Amino acid sequence: MTTTITRHRPASVKATRNKFTIPVFPHVKKFIQKSYGTAEAIKVEEYNTLGKLVTGILRDNRKRADNNDQYRDRVTSSITIVLTKEQAELSPRITKLLRINIDMDRVFKEHLVTTIQMYSLVGIAPFNACKLFLEHYGIDEKEYSVEAAYKYWQRCKNQNIPRMLS
């Protein structure tokens, strides 16, 4: 009696990870949640700003220094994102995805400036517009202060950054 042992090899299926938890600034977390959903894991869609940023980050192979330790003490929150199939195939790494924090902080500040400009059209002072903006996103003083928002506005205004609304 002869026995034949057959070894079954698993099919070479490349499992791609599509769920990542990324450390972010507390105000960035609230901004993302208010803008893209408050679910435990935010599904990244490729047609919105967050999705386009993520795709761009994953395609960018340049070495970056803007994810360095200078922000580490302020990064006290985190978000969990779920990538699309196409994004997951771009070899995502947490070291690349850390850039979401910096890029979404820039988007947050662009929205801040635009909001201040809008409110100024109806006669609301910039400092009060900062308060209203932060209240809208549920951001408290510990996460991003009204003074910091107002100082950012003043820097933008003093650098003669073109007005988004004319």
Image: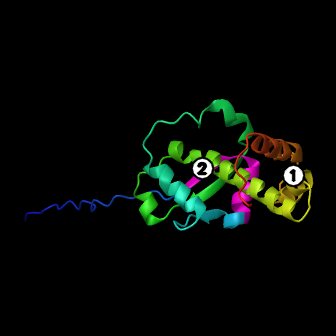
Any magenta on residue 31? yes
Spatial CA distance of label 1 from label 2 is 21 Å
Point out which mark residue 113 bears: none
Residue shown at 51% from the left, 65% from the top:
46
83 with respect to 117 (left or right): left
Q: Is residue 2 above or below residue 20?
A: below
Name the foreground residue: 51 vs 120: 120
| Quadrant occupied by the C terminus | bottom right
Residue 140, labelled with which disc? 1
Three-letter amino acid code of the residue under disc 2: Ile
Relative image position of residue 86 (x, y in whole percent): 42, 63
Cβ–Cβ under 8 Å for marks 1 and 2: no
Instruction: From the top left corner, tell me how far across and down residue 100 is, in percent.
Output: 60, 49
| Disc 2 crowd, CA 10 A, few/some/many (<14, 14-19, 20+) | some
Q: Nearer the viewer, residue 19 or 71?
A: 71
SS of the residue under disc 1: loop
- Along the viewing direction, whichever of 135 and 13 lies nearer the viewer: 135
Question: What amino acid does circle 1 point to?
Answer: Asp
Kind of element beneath mark 2: helix
- Residue for point 71% across, 62% down: 33
Give the prevailing secondary structure in the magenta stretch: helix
Q: Residue 100 shows which numbered tag? A: 2
Disc 1 packing (10 Å; few <14; some 14–19; many ≥20): some
Q: How is the image coloured?
A: rainbow
- Residue at the far front: name it: 166
- The extreme left residue here reads 1
Which residues lie in the magenta part? 20-34
- Place of residue 125 in the rendered image (x, y in percent of width and height, measured from the top left): 92, 55
- The percent coordinates of residue 69 (x first, y second) are 64, 31
Residue at left 20%, top 59%?
7
